Image: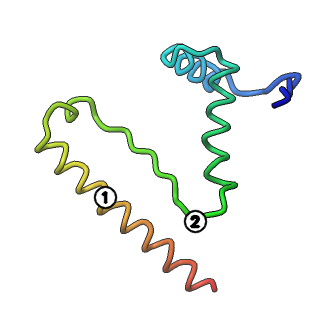
Amino acid sequence: MAKFKPRGISMDDDIHKKVQLAAKKANMSMSQFICKLIENFTEHLVNDNNDKPIIITIPADLVDDEEKLRGWLHKKSEAIINALQAQKSQKAQKG
């Protein structure tokens, strides 16, 4: 695969710091991290199926407590279902 080297990317300082920190945590260069981020994000936008990507950040204090984690995930899954149903209703009303 050919590599495209853009001349630059502009971003606010606060976003730059967040990307820099995230890249460091992932043991990647900023360039590698940004490429992976774009690859992962665009994959969901250009695929031919209608999958809905969802990112969930699990609180650290729940990771080792299965019962609390299950309860938390149940609440989150209900919220996701409600949000998807609301989107469906909005599209039907516009449609």
- Mark earlier in primary sequence (2, 1): 2
SS type, badge 1: helix
**Which label is found at residue 35?**
none
Query: Eyeballing the image, is 29 above or below 61?
Result: above
Name the side, left or right, on which 77 lies relative to 29.
Answer: left
Q: CA distance from mark 2 to mark 1?
A: 19 Å
For the residue carrying disc 1, how many other residues have a C-alpha within 10 Å: few (<14), some (14-19), or many (20+)?
A: few
Residue sitting at x 26%, y 29%: 60
Count of numbered marks: 2
Residue sitting at x 66%, y 38%: 39
Query: Eyeballing the image, is 78 above or below 31?
Result: below
Residue sitting at x 22%, y 48%: 72
SS type, badge 2: loop
Q: Amino acid at mark 1?
A: Ser
Where residue 16 sits: x, y (%)?
65, 21
Name the side, left or right, on which 28 lies relative to 60.
Answer: right
Q: Nearer the viewer, residue 62 or 43?
A: 43
Q: Nearer the viewer, residue 37 or 93?
A: 37
For the residue carrying disc 2, how many other residues have a C-alpha within 10 Å: few (<14), some (14-19), or many (20+)?
A: few
Q: Name the residue that disc number 2 marks.
A: 50
Q: Amino acid at mark 2?
A: Asn
The quarter of the displayed image where residue 9 is located? top right
Q: Quadrant of the N terminus?
A: top right
The quarter of the displayed image where residue 61 is located? top left
Seen as rendered, the residue at the extreme right is 7
Q: Name the residue that disc number 1 marks.
A: 77
